[in-house]
Image: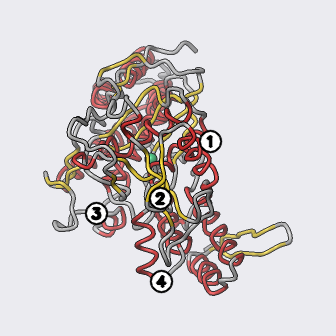
Amino acid sequence: MSRPEVRFFNTLGRRLERFEPLAPPRVGLYTCGPTVYNHVHIGNLRTFLFEDLLCRSLRFLGYDPFQVMNLTDVDDRTIAGALAAGRSLDDFTAPFIASFHDDLRVLGVRPADVYPRATRHVTEMVAIIERLVERGFAYESDGSIWFRIAADPDYGRLSGIDLSGARQGARVASDDYEKEDAKDFVLWKGAKPGEPAWDSPWGPGRPGWHIECSAMSAKYLGETFDIHCGGVDNVFPHHENEIAQSESASGRPFVRYWLHSEHLLVDGEKMSKRLGNQYTLRDLLERGLSPRAIRYALVSVHYRQKLNFTFDGLRGSASALKRVDEMLFRLRHAAAGAREAGGGGAVLEGRAAAFLAEFGRALADDLNVSAALAALFELVRDVNVAIERGEVGEADRDTVERALHRADSVLGVLFWDGEAAAGGAAAGPTDDSIRERIEARLEARRRRDFQAADRIRDELAAEGVVLEDTPQGTRFKRRSG
Ligand SMILES: [Zn+2]
């Protein structure tokens, strides 16, 4: 298959660029995953759905994406949460990892190829930090290791930050900070009493947040790869720091295309704890909203536009989908009528092919989903007109359904199966979330915390999953009914 020319808006350079992956059709893609200290909110979900749409579009356009999404299970916030709850880090993060996988499944997100966890890749992080120290980009102070931004003349290239006022040697210890705080940032934090710690050449401690993604992306995608995504919030400091770390350590370009999705607003306002509008998927499902309409609302706005999430807007999503459902219903009826009357004509073949071409062109143009959906609803209108005129033949049903299935390989919302719509509780946890928790239980047993291990087993049992320990490892069975 020949691939159409694809263009993406590259945050690095802030312009539309022709997309040319390193080794087509493969596309290596790193997407910053959740920090698993609570349930993700719909702002996070917008980013994950954008990345799902991107992978699905790449596949539609003839590419073969390999997606890595990390889980940040050690950072300032997860540690604070675990300490407050009086639980180990693994125990504390396990239910949030599970609910994250469940949310993605309920919204019809295709799983990434790997979900590496930060706590399982500390060795790789230490190796990069060692290289940075050797090459003069990092130094030790106060028992921690810091990245020296003055040693990196390219620092600020992604975010366009102005460093003229930055004082040499001034440091910032927290994982997340504002532009005004562009200072030497922490790569490795010396252990504090009561906090989880790993061994390193600089004594026990734990990684800073930014180094996690530099280490895990290099491990699964190589030192240079095609696409790195995230929300606009991540441009500074997280992604700026990832570039600084990775390129200073490897001496090679890190990422070719940076794609960032805009903020999600709720009723025109930024989400915040104070306003009480940081909805989780669970909150929305409890209000009786359908996951199908939520998915449509989140994917139907171009990723570089702010998305204003409102309950009225969701009703609009539901009615847009109803137009597609009704057309398909009428088409099946009309095709059956044509068969009985012996009319097997095919009048819509050319029209369906033209639709798919236009749909693909729209996606290739920096994921112009508005144009792709406009093409879809023009097709719906034209099919309805053909039905009303009595022109539709038996073969047309297949033609149109095939075209819509092809489009739905990207949208994931037209042919919605009840399974996904039934939601997490009814359908049970995903295999990924079960495996994560089996691993957490093994970890607990290794450190002889049998209470924690039993709690994980009981939680799974309550969700209808039975564990069985065998000499070959732990297996699981889902109780049916
Ligand atoms: Zn990241």
Which is in the foreground here, disc 1 or disc 3? 1
Residue kind at label 3, given as amino acid type: Tyr
Q: Which of pointers 1 and 4 lies earlier in the amino acid sequence?
A: 4
Compare residues 1 and 193 and report the one nearer the observer. Answer: 193
Q: Viewed as shown, does residue 436 lie left or right of 259? A: right
Q: Is residue 57 above or below residue 99?
A: above
What is the distance, in whole Å, between disc 2 and disc 1 at their CAs? 24 Å
Q: Is residue 366 above or below residue 446?
A: above
- Residue at image position (50%, 78%) is 194
Which is in the foreground here, disc 4 or disc 3? 4
Q: Which of pointers 4 and 2 lies earlier in the amino acid sequence?
A: 4
Q: Is residue 311 above or below residue 253?
A: below
Which quadrant holds residue 301?
top left
Residue kind at label 4, given as amino acid type: Gly
Q: Secondary structure at mark 4?
A: loop
- Residue at image position (33%, 30%) is 157
What is the distance, in whole Å, between disc 1 and disc 4 at their CAs? 33 Å
Q: Which residue is mark 2?
A: 144
Q: Which of pointers 1 and 3 lies earlier in the amino acid sequence?
A: 1
What is the distance, in whole Å, between disc 1 and disc 3 at their CAs? 34 Å
What is the distance, in whole Å, between disc 2 and disc 3 at their CAs? 37 Å
Crowding at mark 2 (Cα within 10 Å: few <14, some 14-19, many 20+): many
Q: Which mark is residue 86?
A: 4
What is the distance, in whole Å, between disc 4 and disc 3 at their CAs? 26 Å
What is the distance, in whole Å, between disc 4 and disc 2 at their CAs? 25 Å
Crowding at mark 1 (Cα within 10 Å: few <14, some 14-19, many 20+): few
Q: Secondary structure at mark 2?
A: strand
Q: x, y (%) of residue 111?
A: 54, 48
Which is in the foreground here, disc 4 or disc 2? 2
Q: Secondary structure at mark 3?
A: loop
Q: Viewed as shown, does residue 228 lie left or right of 317? A: right
